[in-house]
């Protein structure tokens, strides 16, 4: 992808998204998205899932000092090294499956969901909640920004096709075979069941998130759900919410 295809948007006050085209297996368009949040002290928390190209870095640098970099699950880690190289003083957080993989690449995490104690505080918890999904095969972490009532997720929820992420691309955002993949559809519900490696844990974790007070969902893959996000989450995880 080219830097010109990156769509940078201030979704709401103190929340920016960086959306790019991305096709799974080279033909299934799901898009990619990073999210940056400006904390009350002016520092920046980044859910890093897309390339740190010039437009992305320029915008981040204009917002404030990057203090936290997050690799949100076992597969969204391709660009975390380049973010750390650009922001060497930032604290990097990841998940248990990434520890050895990244150590071989010379990256040591400052905190690891699934390894650290569940009550570990990294410094942003008063503003951003986190729930580690031990029951998901990718070991995802869901985050919620309290001020904007925004839930930020990687592979926990999809809202496809990725219209915004392909809006500056000459490639098509149309999904082959399925047409759409969103939280209210039966395909999404089946997918949630398929990726539940521990159904009991998934129930506990999905219910925890359902009880958070959020209205918006910012997924890595697909369009932002601007409102009624909690309803969308509860529908997608209906089989797992107590």
Image (spheres, rainbow, N blue to C red):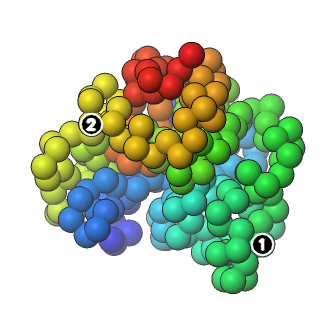
Helix, strand or loop at disc 1? loop
Residue 60: in sight, yes or no?
no
Local packing at callout 2 (Cα closer than 10 Å; few below 14, some 14-19, many 20+) is some
Q: Please state the horizontal and vertical placement of residue 18, each as a whole percent of the image.
A: 46, 53
Give the quarter of the image for residue 138.
bottom right
Residue at mark 2: 187
- In the image, residue 32 above or below residue 149: below
Q: Quadrant of residue 6?
A: bottom left
State the image coordinates of residue 170 (x, y, percent, origin top left).
17, 63
Determine which of the numbered discs, if any, sits on residue 31 in the image: none
Element carrying mark 2: helix
Relative placement, left or right, of 147 versus 32 is right
Between the residue at mark 1 and the residue at mark 2, the CA separation in whole angstroms equals 37 Å
**Residue at left 15%, top 42%?**
179
- Residue at mark 1: 108
| Residue located at (25% from left, 69% from top) | 26
């Amino acid at each position: 992808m080219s830097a010109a295809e990156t769509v940078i948007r201030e979704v709401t006050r103190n929340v920016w998204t960086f959306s790019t085209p991305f096709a799974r297996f080279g033909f299934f368009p799901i898009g990619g998205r990073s999210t940056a949040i400006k904390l009350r002290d002016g520092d920046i928390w980044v859910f890093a899932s897309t390339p740190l190209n010039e437009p992305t870095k320029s915008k981040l640098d204009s917002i404030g000092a990057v203090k936290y970099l997050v690799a949100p699950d076992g597969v969204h880690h391709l660009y975390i090294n380049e973010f750390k190289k650009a922001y060497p003083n930032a604290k990097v957080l990841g998940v248990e499956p990434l520890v050895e993989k990244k150590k071989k690449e010379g990256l040591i995490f400052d905190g690891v969901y699934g390894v650290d104690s569940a009550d570990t505080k990294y410094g942003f918890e008063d503003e951003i909640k986190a729930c580690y999904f031990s029951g998901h095969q990718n070991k995802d972490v869901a985050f919620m920004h309290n001020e904007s009532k925004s839930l930020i997720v990687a592979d926990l929820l999809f809202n496809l096709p990725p219209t915004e992420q392909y809006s500056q691309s000459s490639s098509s955002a149309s999904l082959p075979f399925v047409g759409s993949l969103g939280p209210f559809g039966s395909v999404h519900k089946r997918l949630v069941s398929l990726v539940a490696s521990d159904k009991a844990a998934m129930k506990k974790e999905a219910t925890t998130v359902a009880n958070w007070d959020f209205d918006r969902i910012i997924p890595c893959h697909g369009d932002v759900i601007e409102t009624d996000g909690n309803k969308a989450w509860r529908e997608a995880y209906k089989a797992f919410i107590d």
